[in-house]
């Protein structure tokens, strides 16, 4: 259901004499309750006029989970490649107003792997960027942590050495 304590704004609006419309603004608060997308019912009435009813879906803005795009293999050490993250509510809907931050880390068979960047911020529930891992590992994975126990790992992929930029031979 829709909880009144999760909303900020007036519960009623007055339509001035001679006018036919008025605006009622309601701001949904992030209440920490993952309650899906309940239906809100709106009623309008006035003396001497027929009443009217309407309903609308209130999309939950509380973060439930994030997903990460698949990473193809292999990647080359210290060469940037793209990934993307998406923020979802408990109903599996993208939270188009979500702007929270997250941390990124990488690990593999050799333990923790150096990577950049190590953090980011969602914009409209999405983040896309280039990342790089500065290590060689046959089974690397990236982890995105949005806090509050909301963590998602990537698939595993190989990170192989890059080409040698120069070679000096001395005798």
Image (spheres, grey):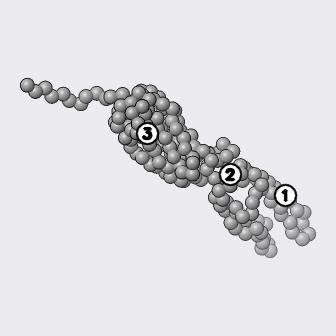
**Residue lying furthest bottom:** 17
Tell me the number on the disc at residue 34.
2
Tell me the number on the disc at residue 53.
1
Marks 1 and 3, how far apart at CA: 52 Å
Say left or right for 145 vs 163.
right
Q: Mark 2 and mark 1 in contact (Cβ < 8 Å)? A: no
Q: Mark 1 vs mark 3: give the one in front.
A: 3
Q: Earlier in the sequence, mark 2 or mark 3?
A: 2
Tell me the number on the disc at residue 108.
none
Q: Earlier in the sequence, mark 1 or mark 2?
A: 2
Residue 104 at x, y = what percent?
Answer: 46, 44
Mark 2 neighbour class, 10 Å CA radius: few under 14, some 14 to 19, many 20 or more: some
Secondary-structure class at tag 1: strand
**Residue lying furthest left:** 171
Camera-side residue: 126 or 115? Answer: 115
Image quadrant in which you'd find residue 53: bottom right
Q: Residue at x 90, y 71 (%)?
A: 47
**Tag 3 residue:** 106
Q: Mark 1 vs mark 2: give the one in front.
A: 2
Secondary-structure class at tag 2: loop
Q: Mark 3 and mark 2 in contact (Cβ < 8 Å)? A: no
Quadrant of image for the N terminus: bottom right
Image quadrant in which you'd find residue 8: bottom right
- In the depicted structure, whether residue 134 falls above or below residue 41: above
**Residue 122 at least partly seen:** no
Q: Residue at x 86, y 66 (%)?
A: 45
- In the depicted structure, whether residue 148 falls above or below residue 82: below
Secondary-structure class at tag 3: strand
Marks 1 and 2, how far apart at CA: 27 Å
Residue 30 at x, y = what percent?
Answer: 64, 58
Q: Residue at x 87, y 69 (%)?
A: 46
- In the depicted structure, whether residue 120 falls above or below residue 13: above
């Amino acid at each position: 259901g829709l909880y009144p304590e999760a909303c900020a704004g007036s519960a009623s609006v007055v339509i001035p004499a001679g006018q036919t419309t008025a605006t009622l603004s309601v701001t949904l608060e992030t209440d920490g309750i993952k309650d899906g997308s309940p239906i809100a019912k709106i009623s309008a009435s006035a003396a001497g006029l027929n009443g009217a009813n309407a309903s609308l879906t209130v999309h939950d803005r509380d973060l439930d989970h994030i997903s990460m795009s698949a990473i193809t293999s292999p990647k080359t050490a210290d060469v940037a490649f793209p990934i993307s993250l998406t923020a979802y509510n408990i109903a599996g809907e993208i939270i188009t107003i979500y702007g929270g931050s997250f941390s990124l880390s990488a690990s593999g068979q050799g333990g923790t792997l150096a990577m950049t960047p190590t953090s980011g911020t969602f914009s409209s529930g999405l983040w896309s960027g280039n990342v790089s891992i500065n290590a060689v590992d046959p089974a690397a994975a990236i982890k995105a942590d949005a806090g509050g126990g909301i963590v998602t790992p990537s698939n595993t992929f190989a990170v192989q050495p890059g080409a040698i930029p120069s070679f000096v031979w001395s005798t």
